[in-house]
Image: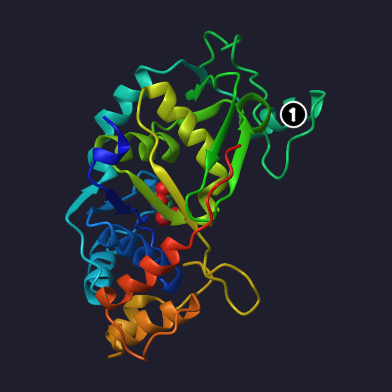
Amino acid sequence: MSTKSRRMVGRFAPSPTGGMHLGNARTALLAWLHTRTHGGRHLLRFEDLDTGRVRAWAYDATRRDLDWLGLDWDEEYIQSERLEFYAHALNTLTTYPCTCTRREIAAAIQDSAGAPHGSEPVYPGTCRSASAPGDPRPAARRWQVPAETVCVPDAWTGAILCQDLPSEVGDLVLQRNDGVFAYHLAVVVDDAHSGVTDVLRGADLWTATPRQVALQRALGYVTPRYLHVPLMTDFRGERLAKRGGAPPIMTLRESGESPERVLSELARGLGWLVPEEVTGSELIPFWQEVWSRRPTPDLS
Ligand code: GLU
């Protein structure tokens, strides 16, 4: 099936680890605008596999925040209810058990000739062939990444990111030793199963995109179009975070603030010249305008 003939499908995929703050709301707004601009289907997906960080109240709080902002969705699902799909996908990939601890991995990196690339330590593949039989420790499952370089264009920024999988990414854990499936696996399986054509998300996930595209290829999935939008920062230039006390939407909602004012502030933060109060639908022409002027990735 050609990409052109498929109906556009977009999504917003919050982690229910707390209430939404302004930064999450801005990403949610842009994802919604992008889908609605294209007459697509919009999905809400709760990414709750890391159960230790999940807050039970956050699902409903997020739904209410989105509702209050007028950012509707056509379908909702929850990752923790889809474990069988991740297990199935994992079984079709070339993986191996790994009992290495973080400390052992750090030591192996130190001993190997290559220093870790950038800020992210690259797993040197210690367990690839020597998955210590009889090791009683619970094992994680690592994916043996193909020996190739994956390049991904970003449809929004026009940037292209290439990563050599073995040397810059390394064999990734797709299931932790406590059984929890990795975000990278779940996101790829879910986007493919629900026919997501456009992934608009925060720029913090840009460097994770080549490994997700590599997983899509290994699983025979179509790669969606990616748009990474800047994260909101505070006056120090630090990214807004739930932990850092960024103003929760819930607080604004409960204090009688108008959602149209909040949307207006978010839009003005993007440099859009909008009235003091504005609805999501009224922002669609603004997204249409910036989208039509986006740079084209240079794939030459
Ligand atoms: N759950 C991720 C987050 O809240 C987003 C994942 C994605 O959009 O691919 O940051």
Residue at 45% x, 52% y: name it: 227
Element class at badge 1: helix
Mark 1 crowd level (few <14, some 14–19, many ≥20, 10 Å Cα) = some
Viewer-proximal residue among 104 and 211: 211
Residue located at (25% from left, 29% from top): 84
Where on the picture, by quarter, is residue 287?
Answer: bottom left
Which of 275 and 178 lies nearest the eye of the viewer?
275
* Residue at x 34%, y 49% (from the top left corner): 47
Colour mapping used in the image: rainbow
Q: Relative to residue 15, is residue 179 depicted above or below?
A: above
Residue 191 horizontal/vertical position (percent): 32, 40
Position of the N terminus, as image quadrant, is top left
Q: Could one spot residue 49 in this view of the protein?
A: yes
Left or right of 253 on screen, residue 164: right
> Is residue 195 visible to us here?
no
The answer to whether residue 215 is left or right of residue 191 is: right
Percent x, y for residue 108?
A: 73, 25
Q: Amino acid at mark 1?
A: Ile
Indicate the quadrant where residue 62 lies: bottom left
- From the image, tell me which residue sits under label 1: 109
Left or right placement of residue 234 versus residue 196 in this view:
right
Q: Is mark 1 within 8 Å of ligand 1?
A: no
**Image quarter in which the C terminus is found:** top right
Residue 143, percent from left and from top: 50, 22
Q: Nearer the viewer, residue 224 or 194?
A: 224
Question: Relative to residue 271, is residue 291 depicted above or below?
Answer: above
